[in-house]
Image (cartoon, helix red, strand yellow):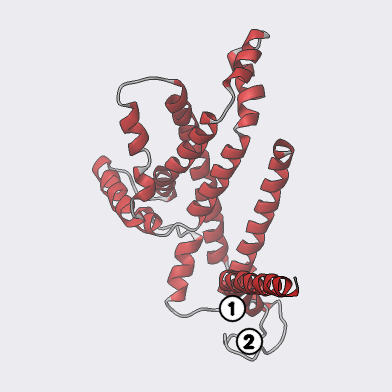
């Protein structure tokens, strides 16, 4: 009995150590980034000199960085909206409509997701040059939406496959119009897929570099600004930007969990 208890405790200790190592591997670099964003020194070396808000003040006084941040939000929000507008109807078509080549279309819709970003960027660049489009943030939005639309289609389609169609039939039998059935029955049941795919698309678009590199014009997005800045070395100002992005990501996670909780329960 004592031997079994000791073995169980040893096993739990080993398991706990492995979990701690995994968490440290994942989050220690993020913790270091946050700590150095408050370091009272431009040198990113130990020991720390002291606590300061200087780099956040520098950040909010950097007009180029703030403009790049606004551009990133504009591109990510617009690209996410476009992926939803195209991806949701495509998912419904795959789930509800029979048409020639449906199986091929379902396979091909995954292609932009598995293609390297550099291939997507070069392909879209050639297309825009062929049709005479000037490179701008709008071309970046189209490129991001093209690369990310498969996320929405696959997520929503998978949720529709698990949807109990008898709920829609019951609503129709009770006199609900098609649009009422969609908004009051179907949409609440696929809400988790919509929110999840939208958040993932927003995140991937926000930090996308390869596609943006080929399709952007004179306007920088935040990842492109950081990339160009890092060629001169890491600065505490960049750490401050990263800390704010981490904070924003945590807020988005909390909001998404709170929005999904009533349905999950």
Q: Residue 165 placed where, x, y %?
A: 57, 21
Classed neighbour count for the residue bearing mark 2: other residues with Cα under 10 Å, few (<14), some (14–19), many (≥20)? some
Do labels 2 and 1 touch, CB within 8 Å? yes
x 36%, y 50%: residue: 114
Q: How many marks?
A: 2
Residue 131's spot in the image, x, y percent?
27, 40
- If you read the primary sequence from the N terminus, does the residue marked by circle 2 or circle 1 appear first? 2
- Which label sits on residue 117? none
- Image position, residue 122 (x, y; %): 29, 53
Question: In terms of depth relative to the viewer, which is nearer, 183 or 126?
Answer: 183
Front residue (pair 260, 222): 260
The residue where tag 1 is placed is 236
For this view, does 97 lie left or right of residue 38?
left
Does any portion of residue 101 appear in the rendered image? yes
Mark 1, Cα crowd under 10 Å, few <14 / some 14-19 / many 20+, is: many
Q: Does any portion of residue 61 appear in the rendered image?
A: no
Which residue lies under the disc numbered 2? Answer: 41
């Amino acid at each position: 009995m004592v031997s079994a208890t000791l073995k169980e405790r040893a096993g739990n200790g080993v398991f706990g150590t492995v979990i701690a190592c995994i968490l440290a591997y994942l989050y220690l670099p993020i913790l270091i980034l946050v700590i150095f964003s408050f370091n009272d020194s431009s040198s990113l070396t130990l020991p720390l000199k002291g606590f300061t808000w200087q780099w956040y003040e520098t950040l909010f006084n950097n007009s180029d960085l703030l403009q790049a941040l606004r551009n990133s939000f504009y591109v990510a929000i617009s690209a996410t909206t476009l992926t939803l507008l195209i991806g949701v109807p495509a998912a419904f078509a795959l789930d509800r409509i029979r048409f020639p080549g449906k199986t091929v279309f379902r396979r091909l819709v995954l292609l932009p997701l598995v293609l390297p970003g550099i291939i997507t960027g070069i392909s879209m660049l050639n297309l825009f040059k062929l049709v005479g489009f000037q490179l701008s943030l709008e071309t970046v939005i189209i490129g991001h939406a093209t690369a990310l639309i498969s996320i929405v289609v696959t997520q929503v389609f998978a949720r529709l496959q698990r949807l109990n169609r008898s709920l829609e039939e019951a609503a129709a039998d009770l006199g609900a119009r098609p649009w009422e059935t969609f908004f009051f029955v179907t949409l609440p049941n696929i809400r988790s897929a919509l929110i999840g795919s939208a958040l993932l698309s927003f995140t991937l678009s926000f930090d996308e570099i390869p596609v943006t590199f080929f399709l952007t014009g004179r306007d920088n997005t935040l990842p492109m600004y950081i990339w160009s800045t890092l060629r001169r070395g890491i600065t505490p100002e960049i750490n401050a930007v990263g800390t704010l992005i981490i904070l924003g990501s945590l807020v988005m996670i909390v909001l998404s969990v709170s929005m999904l909780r009533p349905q999950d329960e």
